[in-house]
């Protein structure tokens, strides 16, 4: 684990320009496409059931986000996930607000059952999803960092997915290993769909790596480093969003060094 | 009415972070979410009929915008408005281009009949909606400021809604009181969906206030003040959009002072 | 042809503020609307089958983009194109990724058969569309600049449309005349949907001109000039997108001069 080197992951993304197929929400589409282009990946948004599976089989990674779901889109997501599985293509599940309505809980459980490579959400979403898919393992309903960590480990072990809980400090686990990624900036939650766009970035890193846990950690490290850089010049959420794309584009692998004085501080341990 | 204090309304929005549920058009979604986040509210876009009503009952305010409508979305808007009414949640109608096609005229009339708390549109839209829902009270078809004022008062009295006619100088009326809000900037109409996003801001202010007329006036005052600030540094519509989000985020309540020399000049009278 | 004067075309767009009706993809909508507003046109996005044809008959130009297609939208595009044809309104086809899936190939062929005024795509898209609609005229599958030129001329002659192949150097042909437009900036492909938004700009220029070939060339020239200006100040794709809107807004007709030292270098010849 000490060998986890986010910089080399970033270099592979830029060298391979992975085609990332996204069925994401309406709010996030433009932001996600710009984030992936700035990073050096190639985004595509294709959602019709008539072509989603066919396209997923062509892509290097797939990401599914239930933010502005409809039954048609959910069917297309199901098709696309099955096509990705058949092709051995990694895919990411972003269970936006999965606990909010019955429709979302069912959608989350249905997509979870298809076996995502990585699941990325905030603490509440991971807790809600763990409750749905975790078979009643007793995840606390109190939404603390501790309970999110326990939920993430449980969800990872139950689903076989890498689970990323993003927040002020991100947490990533495959049930065995656990990483914490610090960095980013306080303005990031004030810019819409930066979390959704991160899901696309995780897809790009998964496409360019062997180990999904390492790829997910590397993606979060790159994002956090770009966020710190952007925060240095931003005066509000508008200028932050602009600076963030510029920072992703210019991201210096050296900024991903894992030393305590580096930008994106990364801590690796065994899962509890 | 002399006590109308936009600054205290803004402070309440920021203190309560209202969850604003929006069924808005595809063009506006990202802009509206960023505007609401910059302001200090919490946006959510949820449009499927399978969950729109359930989600509306959880939200602090609801906004409906017919800009890129389809029959499915219209049904979901209807459901959501009924759920908001049942929960006593305020909601805003944004009748985009309501006069342009038969489908829009019918959609506008259908949603108007559900009793929005506030209606926000430009002069042409308010005139068209008043013609639909006003029972033939003889609103002039000539699209002057005067006729828009008469249409707004008529529409407010007929519908029970606060009516906001936004333009170079905004007009707000509940049929009894009338406010004019000056400010903003000439570049605002050159940035897409800033009007649509304002509808979300009205929702946020309604959620945090008792009096819908005062809340609507305060929302428009805050928007106009941020627009003036943004205009001070912008060199075109691209930089204006960025500066506008930064200005909303940093908006100083003192900028909302209603003195003639303040940023957002506010004039209150009785309706004619 | 020597008389082709992009500056006068731009002046006519600004003087007439054409209403451009767009059925475009979800990723592009916001960008396209901002680009058209910055330029001085009036964008509208209307996609429901219940109103698409009615609205197309009101507009000065129509643009159709298959980027995030669904069967419903395709039917609405078909309706809108027929209404535009009946009204003598020019319309543009943007065949995004037309070769990628069977659904797209069929959609591209169906819309092509309705007779667009201009087709705008990248080299791969024009090659794929020429293969679909060109009746097997032997377009090379090797995706070189030469083969794209041959495909464009063939497609123009077969379809009667002006064909624009955009890339580092754009190529426009009506089968008889051929123009090359240089300019733009290396960051343009790193900002999502600038190509899609250009399709809207072509629509605006078509609405304000007699000769579709000249209008298309003028649109591409204006876009390239704004791209060069934006590139002068941008430090990455985020700041480029902002500067590009400002540059379109401030675009000086003198920047469209066709001299070799001008911004948007334009070369006109006969088609081979």
Image (cartoon, coloured by chain):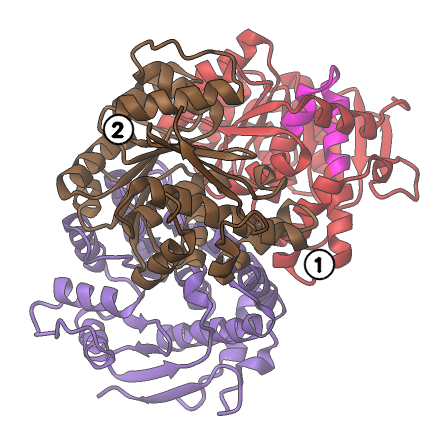
Chain colours: A brown, B red, C purple
Answer whether residue A147 is magenta in the image. Answer: no
Q: C50 and A109: which one is in front?
A: A109
Res B69 visible: no
Mark 2, secondary structure of its residue: loop
The x, y position of residue A195, in whole percent, is 47, 38
Q: B97 above or below A271?
A: below
Q: Is residue C107 above or below residue C188?
A: above
Q: Position of residue A254 (x, y in %)?
A: 50, 60
Taking the image as shown, residue A205 lies to the left or right of residue A246, namely left
Quadrant position of the C terminus of chain B in the picture: top right
Quickly name the residue at label 1.
Answer: B234
Residue depicted at x 29% and y 32%: A73
In the image, the segment drawn in magenta is B202-222
Which of discs 1 and 2 lies nearer the camera? The answer is 2
Label annotation for residue A160 = 2
User: Total of numbered circles in the picture?
Assistant: 2
Query: Quadrant of the image for the N terminus of chain B?
Result: top right
Give the CA distance from mark 1 to mark 2: 50 Å
Q: Secondary structure at mark 1?
A: loop
């Amino acid at each position: 684990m000490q060998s986890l080197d986010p910089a080399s992951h970033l270099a592979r993304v830029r060298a391979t320009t992975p085609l990332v197929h996204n069925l994401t929400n309406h709010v996030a589409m433009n932001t996600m496409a710009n984030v992936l282009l700035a990073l050096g990946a190639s985004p595509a948004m294709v959602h019709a059931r008539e072509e989603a599976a066919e396209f997923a089989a062509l892509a290097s990674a797939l990401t599914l986000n239930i933010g502005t779901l409809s039954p048609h889109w959910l069917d297309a997501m199901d098709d696309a996930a099955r096509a990705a599985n058949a092709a051995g293509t990694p895919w990411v599940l972003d269970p936006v607000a999965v606990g909010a309505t019955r429709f979302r809980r069912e959608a989350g459980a249905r997509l979870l059952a298809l076996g995502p490579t990585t699941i990325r959400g905030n603490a509440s979403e991971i807790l809600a999803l763990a409750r749905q898919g975790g078979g009643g393992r007793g995840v606390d309903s109190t939404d603390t960092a501790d309970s999110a960590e326990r939920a993430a480990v449980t969800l990872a072990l139950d689903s076989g997915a890498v689970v990323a809980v993003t927040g002020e400090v991100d947490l990533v686990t495959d049930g065995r290993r656990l990483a914490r990624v610090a960095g980013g900036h306080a303005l990031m939650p004030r810019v819409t769909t930066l979390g959704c766009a991160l899901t696309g970035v995780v897809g790009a890193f998964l496409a360019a790596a062997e180990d999904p846990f390492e790829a997910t950690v590397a993606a979060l490290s790159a994002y956090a480093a770009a966020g710190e850089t952007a925060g240095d010049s931003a005066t509000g959420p508008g200028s932050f969003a602009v600076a963030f794309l510029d920072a992703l584009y210019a991201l210096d692998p050296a900024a991903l060094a894992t030393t305590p004085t580096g930008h994106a501080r990364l801590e690796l341990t065994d899962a509890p």
